Image (cartoon, rainbow, N blue to C red):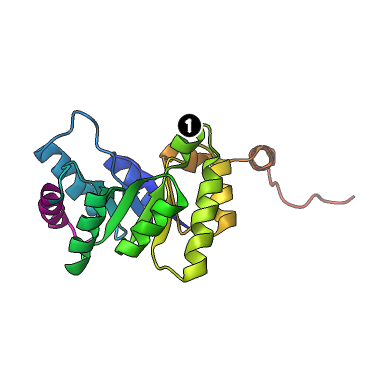
Amino acid sequence: MRFFLDTANVDEARRVREWGLLDGILLNPPADSVGKDARRLLSDLAQVGDGPVIAPLSAGDPKGMYKEARELHKLGKNVVLRVPMTREGLRVVRLLGDEQIATDVGLVFTPMQALLAARAGTAYVSPAVGALDDSGQIGMDVVESVVRVYDNYGLQTQVNVQGIQNPIHVLDAAMMGVDVATLPLGVLEKLFDHPLTQAGLANLRTNTFEGPRRIH
């Protein structure tokens, strides 16, 4: 399973790259980041690593989404455009696919939506487990159904679980064979930790390693 970092912070991306864990980035630009600022941020993130950088489209109509996607893709060959799970969005997926521009379909909350997105030819589909959990559903159950449907038909679209809120989400995704887990830095850092690891490190620090004792 690959890790995509959910961030709009270049320093965070560089930090995760140094750990050898940066397989991609999901850019959620701040609300006050518009126009040239947002594009500059996307360009900077696209240069941090070789993996995909997923950028959401802001336009609502197919013509606007298509035009915006082509412009943003010029900022980096690894830029992947996120389109919404709508009739118009899947139309744009088709158009961009004809030009070899990769897409990610967001706002996916059912296995059937994921199936439609795959049929349209998107590279990634991103069910949002956090939003599903908050709505009273079990988000990872939906993800499991998506994985099963894709396996049934050998679909090549990759399942990218987003909205991950804790390490249990990551474990469940890995157990299901999900392709990508998109998670914030705070959750990724928690994957390193365990009380026994911390206790072992503390024990190592207290040892003096003075060498073998002499036996009299």
Apparent side of residue 97 relative to residue 134 in the rendered image (left or right): left
Viewer-side residue, 214 vs 203:
203
Q: Which residues are magenta?
A: 63-77
Mark 1 nearby-residue class (10 Å; few <14, some 14–19, many ≥20): few
Apparent side of residue 50 relative to residue 99 in the rendered image (left or right): right
Number of numbered callouts drawn: 1
Mark yes or no: residue 31 visible. Answer: yes
Q: Secondary structure at mark 1?
A: loop
Residue 125 rendering spot, x and y as whole percentages: 37, 54
Mark yes or no: residue 21 visible. Answer: no
Whether 73 is among the magenta residues is yes
Q: Quadrant of residue 66?
A: bottom left
Whether 197 is among the magenta residues is no
Apparent side of residue 48 relative to residue 136 in the rendered image (left or right): left
Q: Quadrant of residue 205?
A: top right
Residue located farthest toward the bottom when viewing the structure as drawn? 154
Residue 23 rendering spot, x and y as whole percentages: 38, 56
Residue 72 rendering spot, x and y as whole percentages: 15, 52
Residue located farthest toward the right when viewing the structure as drawn? 216
Q: Residue at x 56, y 47 (%)?
A: 141
Residue 88 rendering spot, x and y as whole percentages: 22, 50
Residue where numbered disc 1 is placed: 135
Apparent side of residue 58 relative to residue 185 in the rendered image (left or right): left
Q: Amino acid at mark 1?
A: Ser
- Above or below, 212 against 97 in this view is above
Q: Residue at x 36, y 58 (%)?
A: 116
Q: Residue at x 18, y 41 (%)?
A: 58
Q: Quadrant of residue 138?
A: top right
Q: Residue at x 27, y 57 (%)?
A: 103
Magenta portion: prevailing SS class: helix
